[in-house]
Image (cartoon, grey):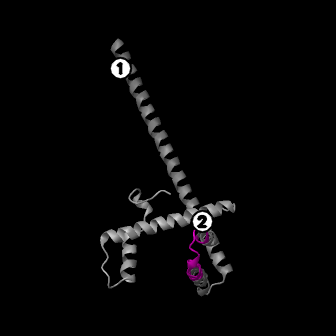
């Protein structure tokens, strides 16, 4: 197994978080910086080991996403079955937090006191207004382009008429010189 110690900094755990956990776990013990780095590297290696095994189990199951069950089976196969009760407890806590977040998000919609149909109608109305404003803006831009094109044509026609008048004046002057 390849070690990630020092090879790839972005594949390690946040040092500050690990150091904080060490300090909270052992508040009255001084821990050398080399030991803290060793713990970070060991944790990183442990996570890599478990995730690699879970990935293999997932692949064998013809699944594309690693599920909690794959991680638990990886822990069992690597000899960490004694942690299973704690893992199940943490998994349940995660599911509870996730469920609370979903309920909170859906309750925000319910707490508005506006029926879903009314919200949908308001949304459609806003979309309609936005489309109308966009069409009006496009119409104004088109009119401005048309006016600019007409102005350019008038300027070109005026310049052409001026050139023709100037050249017929030159011809008249040439005719006068010939007499």
Let me know if residue 74 appears in the view: yes
Q: Which residue is mark 1?
A: 173
Magenta stretch containing residue 78, yes or no? yes
Does residue 90 appear left or right of residue 10 in this picture? right
Determine which quarter of the picture holds residue 30: bottom left
Q: Is residue 179 visible?
A: no
Residue 109 in the image: state x and y as whole percent: 60, 82
- In the depicted view, which residue is nearer to us: 122 or 137? 122
Residue 71 in the figure: left or right of residue 154: right
Disc 2 + disc 1, Cβ < 8 Å: no
- What span is colored magenta in the figure? 75-93
| Residue at image coords 48%, 56% | 2
- Label 2: how many residues lie within 10 Å, few (<14), some (14-19) or many (20+)? many
91 falls in the magenta region: yes
Q: Which residue is mark 2?
A: 54
- Magenta portion: prevailing SS class: helix
Q: Nearer the viewer, residue 66 or 52?
A: 52
Q: Quadrant of the C terminus?
A: top left
Q: Crowdedness of circle 1 by 10 Å Cα count: few (<14), some, many (20+)?
A: few
Circle 1 sits in a helix, a strand or a loop, which is it? helix
Task: Pick the residue in front: 83 or 179.
Answer: 83
Give residue 20's mark: none
Image quadrant in which you'd find residue 24:
bottom left
> Furthest-top residue in view?
178
| Residue 85 locus on image (x, y percent) | 59, 82
Who comes first in sequence, dot 2 or dot 1?
A: 2
Q: Position of residue 17 (x, y in %)?
A: 39, 74
Kindly identify the residue that appears in the image at 62 percent across and 61 percent down. 56
Quadrant for residue 128, please give it: bottom right
Element marked by disc 2? helix
Q: Is residue 178 above or below residue 11?
A: above
How far across and down, in percent of the image, does residue 113 sit? 61, 87
């Amino acid at each position: 197994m390849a070690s990630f110690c020092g090879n790839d900094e972005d594949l390690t755990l946040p040092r500050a978080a690990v150091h904080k956990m060490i300090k909270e776990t052992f508040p009255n013990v001084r821990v050398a910086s080399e030991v803290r780095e060793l713990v970070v590297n060991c944790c990183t290696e442990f996570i890599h080991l478990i995730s690699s095994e879970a990935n293999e189990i997932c692949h064998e199951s013809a699944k594309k996403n690693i599920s909690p069950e794959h991680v638990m089976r990886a822990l069992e196969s690597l000899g960490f079955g004694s942690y299973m009760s704690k893992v199940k407890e943490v998994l349940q806590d995660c599911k509870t937090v996730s469920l609370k977040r979903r309920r909170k998000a859906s309750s925000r919609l319910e707490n508005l006191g506006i029926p879903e149909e009314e919200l949908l109608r308001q949304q459609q109305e806003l979309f309609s207004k936005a489309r109308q404003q966009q069409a009006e803006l496009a119409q104004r831009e088109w009119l401005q382009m048309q006016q600019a094109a007409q102005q350019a044509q008038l300027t070109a026609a005026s310049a052409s008429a001026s050139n023709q008048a100037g050249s017929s004046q030159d011809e008249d002057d040439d005719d006068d010189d010939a007499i």
